Amino acid sequence: MATLSIPNPVPSAIEDAEKLRKAFQGWGTDEKAMIAVLAHRDAAQRKQIKIAYEEQYKEKLLKRIESEISGHFERAVYRWIFDPVERQAIMANIAIKNKVVDFPVIIEIACINSSNELLSVKQVYQSLYKHSMEEDVASHATGDFRKLLFALVGTYRYDGEEINTELAKTEAKILNDAITKGEYNSDEIIRILSTRSKAQLQATFNCYKDAHNLSITKALSTKTPNDFVIALRAAIRCRTTPTKYFEKVLRNILQKSGMDEDALTRVIVMHAEKDLKEIKELFQTRANMTLEQAVAKKTSGDYENFLLALIGN
Amino acid sequence: MATLSIPNPVPSAIEDAEKLRKAFQGWGTDEKAMIAVLAHRDAAQRKQIKIAYEEQYKEKLLKRIESEISGHFERAVYRWIFDPVERQAIMANIAIKNKVVDFPVIIEIACINSSNELLSVKQVYQSLYKHSMEEDVASHATGDFRKLLFALVGTYRYDGEEINTELAKTEAKILNDAITKGEYNSDEIIRILSTRSKAQLQATFNCYKDAHNLSITKALSTKTPNDFVIALRAAIRCRTTPTKYFEKVLRNILQKSGMDEDALTRVIVMHAEKDLKEIKELFQTRANMTLEQAVAKKTSGDYENFLLALIGN
């Protein structure tokens, strides 16, 4: 479930546009008023506000926001304001164009969505960038990452429930053979992980666990994990246990020294309107503090206020 | 343009179903009557006939056809009777399940269709086989063929016209470097060929030709071509000059010793309702005989009559 909270009754898009305009005007920006509007409207409502604002004031809302605020707060608002499909297309493009492809973003988008949801992201990606997501991934990623990310993004997977138990056994063995030999970049691991349906993959991983008394992700927990093994584990967890995956991502960000604001923004912005409630509940059990407390400890100012509003504070 | 000819006015589906029923009954099958109906109706009409037949006579039309006729004639009717999307899904599955993946079928289906057409084929494939086409290609093909076929099938390509001329130059050079070194199975050749849009690919091949005074397909005409190089050339030609490609396929089948009925059936059945007219005209120029004459020389009986009817004789 979502953590996004929307007032009832919700103001009209024209009223919201007026409030934003007022927040932008005068000396400084009224960030609290901005957050009160933007962090409490769903994707369809935000879209209507954008249209109303641009009709009324003859300026692009996004451009105005960029000129009014800055830093992590600006980046978070910029990501939040789009609808989920457009947002993912934009985030995928930013991740691909990074000096080194920001693989967690691509893995999450490729693995969390259903086949048709991912297809919608790819369609919007094409309309925005006049390229396919596949060609950009393939031409920017290199080596093993190219193989993995291309296969994850490229496969229009079967989303149905039918599974083949014999195949699950065979492929659990193939996975174990590769892992035992330390061949984590094996074409077979990549093939199974990227092309099999969620139900089939789950059956394979269950066979793996039954045979080796060890989960596949644990088996991939090498002593000195390299980025590729980290990517494999992320893909496995996004495809089979996404709530646990995102909870762990949040814990890694919020409980370790250092801080990755882009990752924190990404997880909260992408899930606030979807399933952040489950992630947040799991976080509280695992981290012995609420997600709000953890976010408040590591962030500050308008960025903090904005994230807390999305988390449902 | 199509070569399929449909009578005007066209009989109702119920009348056609009756004619088929009559053709099946009695001593032997009246193949001529079957052909007169089935080879002169478009996909939508064939579907209606199937429905009308099954409602009227409480038996599956396809099962009945299979029990009435045999050999190449049966295989051709069996392929023809489906609508183009379902037909391609079935043909892809047969090709994948072949002892060695029948790569021309997969290459043609992956490269001739627009992105959305290919997507439709993949959707029907999933509903028929409860698997994705990608996972079946990836788990049945091996080695370099797996890489090529998976990438061709997996990419939801950009179908627009926007191109990047600098990129075309860079990638023409990448292609040339790989070809010069004889590295035909290079990941870069596969990447460019499978992920780039048709317009971008054409620009790249034009740059290649300008720089080397030689077309890319000629550059790939090795003295002793292996199957993989043949596959690369087929993919290039399907993606850029499909009419020429299919004309050449027909000439290879019909003018060489030996005979590949499955390939002949495939090309005629897949194109009769679409663009066989252009292919046929080109054939006549190149082969110094009409396609009808060439087909008549190499086939016989009902199979011959059926193909000739589809060719528009």
Image (cartoon, coloured by chain):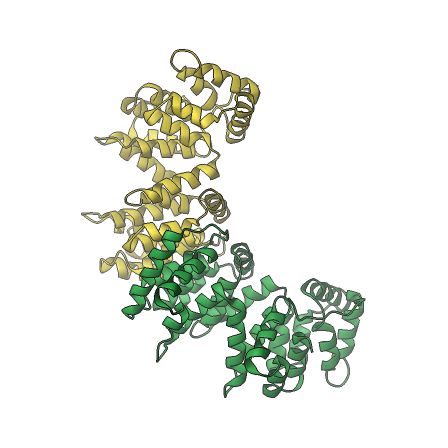
Chain colours: A yellow, B green
- Residue A169: percent from left, percent from top: 37, 61
Quadrant of the rendered image containing residue B34: bottom right
Q: Quadrant of residue A28?
A: top left
Q: Position of residue B69 (x, y in %)?
A: 66, 81
- In the image, taking residue B196 as reference, residue B91 lies left or right, namely right
Q: Nearer the viewer, residue B246 or B262?
A: B246
* Image point (33%, 27%), residue name: A72
What is the residue that sits farthest to the top in this orientation? A27
Residue A4 visible here: no
Quadrant of the drawing holding the C terminus of chain A: top left
The residue at the point 39 percent across, 60 percent down is B207
x, y percent for residue A260: 28, 33
**Number of numbered markers:** 0
* Rendered residue at 23%/32% (across/down): A256
Residue A80 position (above or below residue A25): below
| Position of B256 relative to A75 (above/below) | below
Residue closer to the observer: B151 or A269: B151
Q: Is residue B130 shown above or below A114? A: below
Is residue A46 something that shows in the picture? yes
Q: Residue at x 31, y 59 (%)?
A: A175
Q: What x and y, as percent, mark residue A277?
A: 42, 30
Give whichever of A95, B276 is nearer the camera.
B276
Q: Is residue A44 left or right of residue A25?
A: right
